[in-house]
Image (spheres, rainbow, N blue to C red):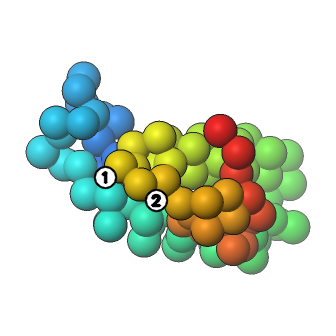
Amino acid sequence: MLMSSAAEKLGLSDPDPDNSPHRDLDEARRVITALAGLVTASVEYLGPHAGPIREGLQALQKAFRESSAHPDEPGKGPGEKLTGPVWT
């Protein structure tokens, strides 16, 4: 649910993300950071699902950077304090 929420807040649920009425980058940052904390804290319990979940999180982090008018430096984006820097 957090991944879906973050995607919606990035506007990815609409054909034109830049003009999505659901787009809210401040909220997307919060949701992505919460997801990063949850994934980081529970990775040992995720078993074979850990890889795909981490990849989904990283895709959201990259999408956030691409959506931002002033992208954060690598390591400073949402959740990157917990996951490490994400490079586009």
Label placed on residue 9: 1
Eyeballing the image, is 12 above or below 27? Answer: above
Q: Tell which tag, 1 or 2, sits nearer the viewer.
A: 1
Quadrant where the C terminus sits is: top right
Question: Circle 2 sits in a helix, a strand or a loop, which is it?
Answer: helix
Do residues under tags 1 and 2 come within 8 Å of each other at their CB atoms? Answer: no
Eyeballing the image, is 20 above or below 73? Answer: above
Residue 42 appears in the picture as rendered: yes
Type of the residue with mark 2: Leu
Quadrant where the N terminus sits is: bottom left
Q: What residue is at 69 percent from the left and 64 percent from the top?
A: 75
Question: Circle 1 sits in a helix, a strand or a loop, which is it?
Answer: helix
Q: Quadrant of residue 15?
A: top left
Type of the residue with mark 1: Lys
**79, 4: nearer the viewer:** 79
Q: What residue is at 29 percent from the left and 41 percent from the top?
A: 11
Tell me: 51 left or right of 2. Answer: right
Going from the N terminus, do you reach mark 1 or mark 2 first? 2
